[in-house]
Image (tube, rainbow, N blue to C red):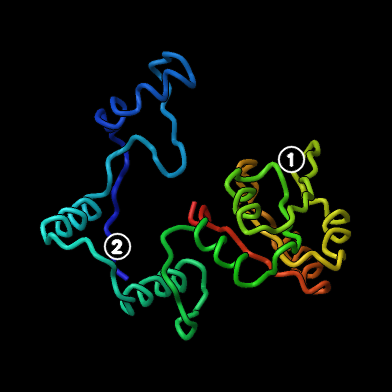
Amino acid sequence: MATTPFLHDDVTEAALAADEARLTRLFGTDENLLPLWIAEPYLDLAPGVVAALQTRARSAWFGYEARSPSLAAVFWEWMAGRHGWDGGGLETMVSPSVGTSIGVLIEELTETGDGVILQPPVFTDFKPLVARAHRTLVRNPLTLTEHGYRFDLDGLAAAAAEPTTRALILCNPHNPVGRVWSRDELARVADICARHDVLVIADEIHADL
């Protein structure tokens, strides 16, 4: 897949101006503060992205899109080149967001009242997804050591062993603690979940960082 390098080094003054009220409310008036937010850095978009949006706007068509086989092909080409994962033969569905996908998976693959494990501190939007689906939140907090955050694997095993526990939302790289879980850590989590038939729902939105 051909790609065009793009150096993000120009702060977008329009974005700073538009967000000035929020910045002031949260952090005061520090002129040197440049928040990155959730995929919202105050930097220019790549020209190709801007051009695609402009082309779509000029078309005057903003209705629902049909499934795009070409989009799935591009996605799997990227995954194969970046991660060595050739999943082109798998059914691929497009979702508006990771949160939407997690919510749908919870609804479809678990039952009302089932336990869903979260490992806080973790992205705050996971908790309401569990609540809205009328599932039971099962907390298994991460352990903070002198070497950083670690999984509480004993706690995870105990939580997964509960008969009503049906799913674990795994965040990797972990937001907000910044851990990229090691192969060994992930293998141990997978072993625990497989042993107790607990579904792993993985949020890997920051994987390419």
Q: Residue furthest top?
A: 29
Decide which of tag 1 and tag 2 comes sooner along the chain.
Answer: 2
Residue 113 vs residue 122, the one in the foreground: 113
Q: Quadrant of residue 51?
A: bottom left
Above or below residue 23? Residue 138 is: below
Picture coordinates of residue 104, whole percent (x, y): 55, 65
Above or below residue 18? Residue 85 is: below
Which residue is under mark 1?
148
User: Callout 1, which amino acid?
Assistant: Gly
Picture coordinates of residue 128, whole percent (x, y): 61, 48
Count of numbered labels shown in the rendering = 2
User: Callout 2, which amino acid?
Assistant: Thr
Judged left or right of residue 45, residue 102 is: right
For the residues labelled 1 and 2, the Cα–Cα distance comes to 36 Å
Picture coordinates of residue 169, whole percent (x, y): 66, 58
Judged left or right of residue 76, residue 47 is: left
Q: Residue furthest bottom?
A: 89
Q: Residue at x 58, y 67 (%)?
A: 105
Judged left or right of residue 80, residue 11 is: left
Q: Quadrant of residue 167?
A: bottom right
Judged left or right of residue 127, residue 113 is: right
Label 2 crowd (10 A; few <14 / some 14-19 / many >=20): few
Above or below residue 54? Residue 75 is: below
Residue 184 vs residue 193, the one in the foreground: 193
Which residue is under mark 2?
3
Q: Are marks 1 and 2 in contact (CB under 8 Å)?
A: no
Q: Residue at x 70, y 65 (%)?
A: 112
Picture coordinates of residue 206, whole percent (x, y): 52, 52
